[in-house]
Amino acid sequence: EVQLVESGGGLIRPGGSLRLSCTASGFTFMYSAMSWVRQAPGKGLEWVSSISGSGGSTYYADSVKGRFTISRDNSKNTLFLQMNSLRAEDTAVYYCAKAWLVRTGGMCWDYWGQGTLATVSS
Amino acid sequence: EIVLTQSPGTLSLSPGERATLSCRANQSISNNYLAWYQHKPGRAPRLLIYSASSRATGIPDRFSGSGSGTDFTLTISRLEPEDFAVFYCQQFGSTPNTFGQGTKLEIK
């Protein structure tokens, strides 16, 4: 059974940093591209960042480029999102998601975690 | 960036009825790379349909997707009580991948 479990969310002040983790099980992690998708309170879903199976290729939404860094440790089946220079508009539930179909223009996701809430507020 | 507009915003139906949800793009989606997800509060989103019309693993055949280019539809042929949720379309034909704003399917 595929499981994705996010952790690391919490309350952080504007300008601060937070590191999210996602521990995966039930599939061959190193073969799967992975992504972070977020949902701000009362809003819809927003793609944040993606990473290839090897970790050699990374992609970011313009809204987080230069502030967020996605990475992975395939030896520990873990995905990370380092979030720096946080803003109030980064407040959201952050979901880790496993890629199902990967194409040149992007991907869709067949398994998602339950999410971890990051709140940026003074 | 491709903007996806879903309609209606809210759909009120009864179990057993047919649901038709629309997703319209402001430009053509490459290779019809359009997915649909179901999302319930506090739960993980669930992939229903990918590439416009292919059902994901384990998805009941009452869910079907259709459309091409800029106009796509998710149909639930006969609503079950567990189907009521928010539904999102998402395009992965071009970067950045974008989602529609969602359609809330509620029990009438």
Image: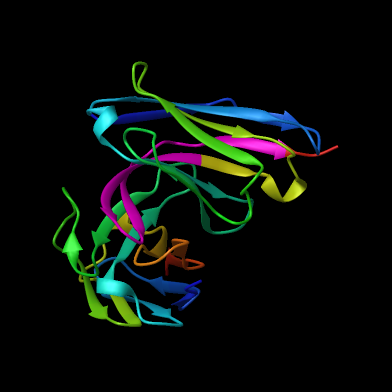
Q: Residue furthest left?
A: B61
Q: Residue furthest front?
A: A56
Residue A121 placement: quadrant: top right
Q: Position of residue A80 (x, y in %)?
A: 50, 29
Q: Which residues are magenta?
A: A95-119
Q: Position of residue A3 (x, y in %)?
A: 32, 29
Q: Nearer the viewer, residue B3 or A57?
A: A57
The C terminus of chain A: image quadrant:
top right
Asked if residue B17 can be seen in this view, the reply is no
Q: Nearer the viewer, residue A34 or A38?
A: A34
The N terminus of chain A: image quadrant:
top left
Q: Position of residue A6 (x, y in %)?
A: 48, 29
* Magenta stretch: helix, strand or loop mostly: strand
Number of numbered discs overlaid on the protein picture: 0
The answer to whether residue A107 is magenta is yes
Q: Nearer the viewer, residue A6 or B12?
A: A6
- The residue sitting at 39% across, 63% down in the picture is B90
Q: Is residue A106 above or below residue A88?
A: below
Q: Residue furthest right?
A: A122
The answer to whether residue B77 is magenta is no
Q: Is residue B4 above or below residue A42?
A: below
Q: Is residue A1 above or below residue B47?
A: above
- The residue sitting at 31% across, 78% down in the picture is B72
Asked if residue A52 can be seen in this view, the reply is yes
Q: Position of residue B51 (x, y in %)?
A: 23, 65
Residue B75 placement: quadrant: bottom left
B21 on left or right of A94: left
Colouring convention used in this rendered image of the protein:
rainbow
- The residue sitting at 33% across, 32% down in the picture is A54
- The residue sitting at 60% across, 57% down in the picture is A62
Q: Nearer the viewer, residue B87 or B10?
A: B87
